[in-house]
Amino acid sequence: MNNPEILEPQDWTFPIPIAYGPGRLSEIGRRCVAMEVSNPLIVTDKGSRDLPFISQLQEYLTQPGLSSGIFSDISPNPRDDEIGAGREAFRLGNHDAIIAIGGGSAMDGGKAVCLTARNDIDLWAFEWEKLPTDIDTYQPFPTLITIPTTAGTGAETESTAMITHTGKGMKFCICHAALKPSLALLDPDLTVGLPANLTAWTGVDAMVHAIEAYCVPGFHPLCDGLALEGLALVAKWLPIAVRDPKNLAARGGMLMGSCLAGIAFQKGLGHVHAISHMIGAEFNTQHGLTNAIILPVVLRFNLPGMESKVKRMAEAMVLEETSVDGFVAKIEQMLDEINIPRSLNEIGVPADCTQRIAEKALLDSAAGTNPRNANVAEMRDIIETAITKAR
């Protein structure tokens, strides 16, 4: 894909309506009018509340005469009590839609609020492992629009959200098949101001999504194809986006790579996410950064015996060395290049949590699709290595 193509506006319909291209945020007002939305609630995270894209979004909404409100009490690892507060804000403001804008936490928070906004169903009834909740007796879910401002989470095309259960100190995935975003608006201009460290952390999150999704066992050529193309885009553009933050082609490539990898992990994820979810729930670490540190340790555990898949991933990344060792070495080299810490200890994860996190991680839905089973002792060893010296 050359640079001119990556900067041209594009409209896609798979797997949901997607509007991609620089400057597309300016269309949000007329698009809301077309969807008969008149008073959306903007849901974002605490760190994004005062960033320029929020005021820009509100300005674009006022142009056709729309009202809007803002709910920004969302933590980096969204909590169940925050979702309850968001539901109240939706109802008190008589809103008719939700625009989730920001990084992964804003996406997850907005989607979770949307799941509960018009019903009295307990949030945890939407948990992934449970039978789908019957919502037929309630009003339909509000219109949901997603606008990512980071290139990493890939959360913009689905209703799935990772939420921290404050009572259990664990993260769980919630969703409902009847909720789909009505529009994902991907505007690379919104990611240009992202600092280098957040560009790196969120970018590796996208790379982990692609790698873990592709390594999940089973026949799913749709997700596998998206995972490989997502990995190709991230491998090409992430180092450039970190090194040259104003490179709009790199920002566009990362936004699309993130989106594709996010769709791909409908197939499943693996131990990187299983561990990262529980560490994030307990120590409030940044999700992409946590994933990035853990990644090489899990790769060394998972990849022996998966040589054919490793070769395909290495080819997607245009690597000369396609062996397991060569692939892992290249990943570690990239992590060094974009200044990812070499241990979880460096981001405040203590050594005495390994048994507890191992037990919780094995309960995570992502552990169930990891290509190699791990018992508690093996999971504990992975976590201990990630804490002390991940690479």
Image (cartoon, rainbow, N blue to C red):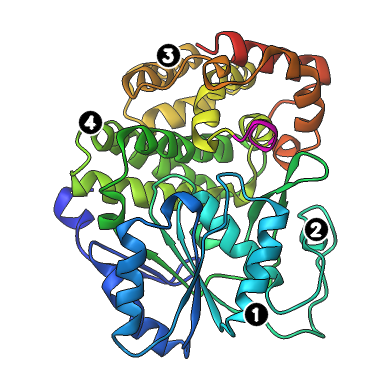
Task: State if disc 1 and disc 4 touch (CB < 8 Å).
Answer: no
Which residue is located at x 67 percent, y 61 percent? 83
The answer to whether the residue labelled 2 contacts the one labelled 3, judged by CB atoms less than 8 Å apart, is no
The residue beneath circle 1 is 91
The local secondary structure at tag 4 comes to: helix
Cα separation, mark 4 vs mark 1, equals 44 Å
* Amino acid at circle 3: Ala
Residue type marked 1: Arg
Which callout, 4 or 1, points at the residue further toward the start of the chain?
Answer: 1
Q: Which mark is residue 329?
A: 3
**The label number, if any, that marks residue 243 in the structure image:** 4
**Mark before the other along the chain sequence, 1 or 2:** 1
- Percent of width and height locating residue 387: 61, 14
Residue corresponding to mark 2: 124
- Mark 3 Cα-neighbour bin, 10 Å: few <14, some 14–19, many ≥20: some
Q: Nearer the viewer, residue 360 or 83?
A: 83
**Residue stretch in magenta:** 278-284
**How many C-alpha atoms fall within 10 Å of the one at disc 2: few (<14), some, or many (≥20)?**
some
Where is residue 235 drawn, in percent x and y?
Answer: 34, 33
